Image (cartoon, grey):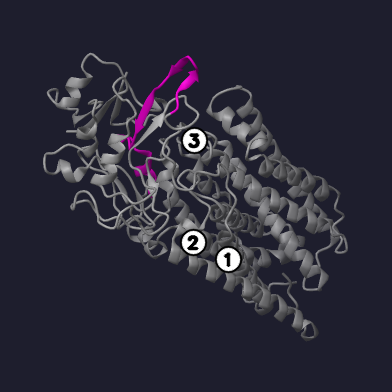
Amino acid sequence: MRYAMAIDLDRCVGCHACSVACKVENNLPNEIWWSRILTVGGKSMDTPEGTFPNLRMQFLPINCQHCENAPCVKACPVGATYKREDGIVVQDYDKCIGCRYCMVACPYSGVRQFNWKKPEYAIEVAMGNASVKPHQSNVVEKCTFCSHLLARDMKPACIDACPNRARIFGDIDDPNSDVSKAMKGRNHIHLLEEKATKPSIYYLT
Amino acid sequence: MTVLTNTKKSNSINLWNIIFAALILLGAICWGFQLTKGLQVTNLGTSNMWGLYITGFMIFTGIAAGSLFFASVPYLFNFNEYKPYSRITAFTGAVSVLVAGLFILVDIGSPWKAWLYIISGNFGSPMFWDFIILTSYLIISIIFTSQLLKVQGGEKDESSIKTIAIVAFIAGLLVVVTSFVFSMQVARPMWNNPAQSISFLVAALVAALAIQMIIVSILNRIGYTKMSPDLFAKIAKVTAVLLVVQLIIVVGEVLIGLYPGAGGGYDATLWLVAGKGAIGFWVEMVALIAAIVILVKASGSSEDGKIVLGAILALVAIYFIKSNFLQAEFLNTLINMPGPQMFGDAAGRYIPSLAEIGLSLGIVSLGALIINLGLNRLNLGE
């Protein structure tokens, strides 16, 4: 069994709903984003590529790629980053010494984020799921594929939040899973394929 | 830094030690501030996650390795005229390991968890092996210094230190393991090449020689050591040759980066030579070339300040080589598209914060104080 996520780039409209759902579900501190929508070609976020009237909008959702050959797992000097049997790359906050070497090793810039200060939140009341591990200062954190939801046979928060159903999740080893079905007959790419990290995120083109 | 062995100059000793102690106190306050507020008091961020502390770590690991190497060379190759200086060199190496270790300790977010290196080390991580190397440097340099002192005191025969000299020589060369921390990362194309091993080794040797030239030059003036101008000039020329090798590597990297005319490597190199990183790069180039010219021409006499000036410029060049090495890569990421702003990424360039500078000054001053005390208490001179 190996969890994987397909992201249909033709369906993504750049609404950032997945980012917000992730933020709420995981009670992410201020300035921490595990899932972000990047704008392709524009000079700043949510701006089109090209010159009027020849404009084009394209988005690239990005979060931890849960790589099969994960550079972060190799790099972590104390084993705080490790890979589960189901393919999820996990960050153990209690073990993380905060050296940020995993961030250096990860080619997908920004998917691993560091708590540079004591976590602060937009509102005083904790949001999201109570079973999410409490955030700690001075450690690296990242997308968990909402493993707390998977433990209850639910999907990651970003999947159901997407209004265009651009994100599909499931066991890629199961031909009848949502993700396997979504990929049938479709071309896909991996981000930075030449780095041989073998990501579990498949971008459908 | 100065070392004075007679009583009439004890006021100077006290003055320097007081200055070092004051800077150590400043560093301790900065560290306390950083531990209380978190690493947000640095100017680091999600993209440029390593800065002054890691640069300091690289430089002092280099000094430690280079010092072990050069302390062993006179005994392995029978350069008798340099043997009296091996004690100072080996001792400087030991202190440099301490300084390098402190730079790592203050850089990690949770230094109280550093013991996990020992009980939970990941053998596949280059950083874990770097920790092993650094620990072995400390042990080897302490043993080597102690053996050299015993030879000096007549307690041991000179031939008996051959083994530790060989170990120190090999350990010095193993500074390439530190380069693996960087060059093994596929995420960082500018680092991901074997030239980094040579660059790290050369930088280590240059930094070690530069520190030795500065220390021995000061010691010569006060009569603690009596290195002849001829020997001094030879060290300066060896340093200049090593700097030429470093210059070739730097120029090669830049030309290889610029030649394609497009792409990630080109953008990062352009950022370095003509973009936001240009000031650091051109200071590096000027310091490199100036150091080479000055050290080649230096006569080596104690009155000739060129040796010290050249050595300082060499250290400045090494600092910027290491700093630019980090920032050119961090601030030009592989996936570089606009999105939600991440912590600390607004500036697009990295200048250390006052807290980082204060803490780094404190760490270096601690090293200087220990060297000063060591020179006074141990029989390190001629």
Q: Which residue is mark 3?
A: B333
The answer as to whether the residues below labels 1 and 2 share one chain is: yes
Q: Nearer the viewer, residue B153 or A58?
A: A58
Say which amino acid is labelled 1: Ile
Query: x, y (%) of residue B291?
Result: 77, 48
Q: Which is closer to the viewer, label 2 or label 3?
A: 3
* A159 over B103 or under it: above or below: above
Give the distance between the C-alpha atoms of the residues marked 2 and 3, in whole angstroms.
Answer: 25 Å
Q: Residue furthest bottom?
A: B7
Q: Where are the magenta residues, as a range?
A: A47-76
Q: Nearer the viewer, residue B69 or A148?
A: A148
Tell me, yes or no, whether the two marked residues, 1 and 2, touch with CB atoms within 8 Å.
yes
Q: Residue at x 77, y 73 (%)?
A: B224
Give the distance between the C-alpha atoms of the residues marked 1 and 3, in whole angstroms.
Answer: 31 Å
Q: Nearer the viewer, residue B193 or B319?
A: B319
Q: Which residue is mark 1?
A: B363
Q: Residue at x 37, y 26 (%)?
A: A59
What secondary structure is found at the residue carrying circle 2?
A: helix
What secondary structure is found at the residue carrying circle 1?
A: helix
A71 falls in the magenta region: yes
Say which amino acid is labelled 2: Val
* A56 over B102 or under it: above or below: above
Q: Which residue is mark 2?
A: B106
Residue B149 seen in the current view: no
Give the number of the disc on residue A105.
none
A62 falls in the magenta region: yes
